[in-house]
Structure formats: C-alpha cells, structure tokens
Amino acid sequence: MQLMERSSMTAALEDHITEVRAVLARIPIDAMERVVAIILDAYRRNKHVYILGNGGSASTATHFACDLSKATIVEGRARLRVTSLTDNVALLTAWANDTNYENVFAEQLCNLLNTGDVVIAISASGNSANVLAAIEAARGLGATTVGLVGFSGGSVKTAADTAIHVESDSYGVVEDCHLVLEHAITESTRAALID
C-alpha cells in the first residue's frame, strides 16, 4: 500500500512539473517583450505601475510589485514606481463592505491613476468581475492595461490592451507560470535599465 501511494505521489509531482514546462514553452516571447516595453515606457515617462489579482493571483501581484520595485533599482537612476493594490486590507475590505467586492480595485484606481499609468491585472480564469472592473476603470482613466491570464483567457484577455495567455486549465500550473513570467519580466526590465 505504501509503495502504491508513493508511486501515485511521484506521478502527480512529475505530471505537474511536466505540464508547467510544456505550458511555459508555448508562451510566445513577443508577448512578454510587449509587457516589458510597456513597463519601460512607463518608467521613461515617470508613470506608475499598479498590479492586482485575487487569491493566489493577489499573492503574485504582491510578489511582482516587490520584485519590480526592488530588483530593477540601478544606482544613480530614477526608480520604477510600482504598487500592488492587493496589500491594503483595510481599504479592500472597506470597499467590499460599503459597496461590493467588484469595486475593490476599480475604486482604488479612481483615487490613484494618472493618464499613462499601467495596470497589470492577474487572473487565472480571466473572468473575475473585480479584475474586469479594474481594467474598465483603468482604460477609462487613460491607463495602459496588461492581463496575465490562464484557462481560455476569459474576458480579461480581450479587455486588456495586451495579455500574456498561459494555456492551461489547471490553477496550479497557471499560477506557477505567472510567477515565472513575473520573474522573467522583472529580469528583462532590469537588464534594459542597466544598458
């Protein structure tokens, strides 16, 4: 019995890693390059990058904002301005309580966004109502929008100005790939700022 459990456990590990590798290999580099170009353009114009998502994607948004803020610092140069909208729990819960959860990101953007800023929306399903509301608010305020999506891409894929689509129906695989993407985008941004 123990040997059979170990065998199925090992198979699950191997299957997950194999799927992550296969899905990553299908993501076009030019989609990632477009996102890096948008971030670099925001940097050059002294604009702000805002990142958001729900659940595991909220954690990815926080992680991405941390990396993009800190890992792109180049001595003697201005710093990239990046904020995760998932981190102010008091504000998130106030908007959810006083209006509804669909507004938790859009209302923050209405206070913060300036024309030309960038909003990166992370959603595995691509159909989270609050993520879509944030994209709509951002576009209405003149921001450039980026989606990191999975599954079929959902509504976020077409609502955002540009999107990177992780073609998998597994939340774990999509979220793993989004983390790889955020690291790759951060590394590429840093490399461009050093040049």
Image: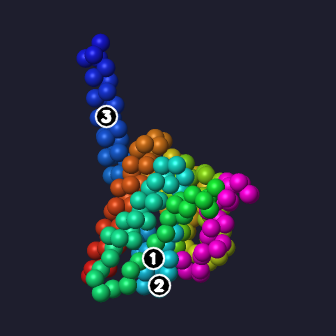
Residue 96 at x, y = what percent? 68, 55
The residue labelled by disc 1 is 81
**In the depicted view, which residue is nearer to us: 70 or 117?**
70
Q: Which mark is residue 46?
A: 2
Query: Dot 2: few (<14), some (14–19), or many (≥20) neighbours within 10 Å?
Result: some
Percent coordinates x, y for residue 114 in the rendering: 59, 80
Question: Which image quarter is the N terminus in?
Answer: top left
User: Helix or strand or loop: what does disc 3 sit on?
Assistant: helix
Q: Which residue is mark 3?
A: 13
Q: CA distance from mark 1 to mark 2?
A: 8 Å
Q: Is residue 107 above or below residue 22?
A: below
Q: Residue at x 49, y 53 (%)?
A: 57
The kind of residue tagged 2 is: Asn
In this picture, residue 4 sits left or right of residue 58? left
SS state under label 2: loop
In which quarter of the view is residue 15 placed? top left
Residue 168 is situated, as x and y percent measured from the top left of the image, at 45, 45
Kindly tell me whether residue 109 is visible in this rendering: yes
Alpha carbon distance from label 3 to label 1: 38 Å
Q: Is residue 119 magenta?
A: no
Give x and y (percent) for residue 135: 61, 65
Which mark lies nearer to you, 2 or 3?
A: 2
Three-letter code for the amino acid on which mark 3 is drawn? Leu
